[in-house]
Amino acid sequence: MVTRAIITLMLIGFGILFALGKGAFLIAGYNTMSAEERAKYDEKKLMKNMSLMMFSCAACTGVGLIGSIIKQPWLVNLGFILMVPCVLYFIIRVNTKSRR
């Protein structure tokens, strides 16, 4: 339960960091791109999409956290099940909507 709370808070923190337009260095694929490849991406859109992803993942882990607190295993499972399509959706969105 404590681990879920820490992960949820970390995801919220990363979401805030990305929402402020900072933290591009934390995105591994973007961080390792050459300057020419980075020019293909709109960094402001990228940060916005990453922020939305972090907040969505925080909501999913929050569902699991609530399930742990109130001892409802189906809520824990629901949080995990919601995480998978959420991450897949945002991987596609970040790679398509963040381009110039």
Image (spheres, rainbow, N blue to C red):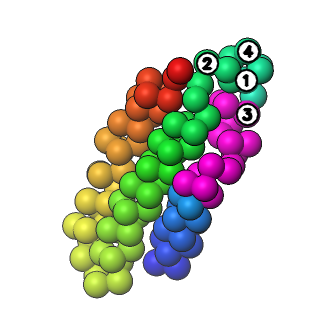
| Residue 13 x, y percent position in the rendering | 58, 65
* Residue at the (53%, 21%) spot, across then down: 100
What residue would you read off at disc 1? Answer: 33
Between disc 4 and disc 3, the foreground one is 4
Give the main secondary structure, helix, strand or loop, of the magenta stretch: helix
What residue would you read off at disc 4? Answer: 36
Numbered disc 2: secondary structure: loop
Q: Is residue 51 above or below residue 34?
A: below
Residue 69: quadrant of the picture: bottom left
Amino acid at circle 2 = Lys
Question: What's the CA distance linking mark 1 and mark 4?
Answer: 8 Å
Q: Which residues are magenta?
A: 17-31
* Residue at the (57%, 39%) spot, across then down: 44
Residue 57: quadrant of the picture: bottom left
* First reached walking from the N terminus: tag 2 or tag 1: 1
| Residue 90 x, y percent position in the rendering | 41, 38
Q: Judge whether residue 7 can be spotted in this image.
A: no
Numbered disc 4: secondary structure: helix
* Residue at the (73%, 42%) spot, across then down: 25
User: Seen from this angle, which residue lies furthest top?
Assistant: 36
* First reached walking from the N terminus: tag 3 or tag 2: 3
Q: Is residue 44 above or below residue 81?
A: above
| Residue 60 x, y percent position in the rendering | 36, 60
Question: What's the CA distance linking mark 4 and mark 3?
Answer: 12 Å
* First reached walking from the N terminus: tag 4 or tag 3: 3
Q: Is residue 36 above or below residue 38?
A: above
What residue would you read off at disc 2? Answer: 40
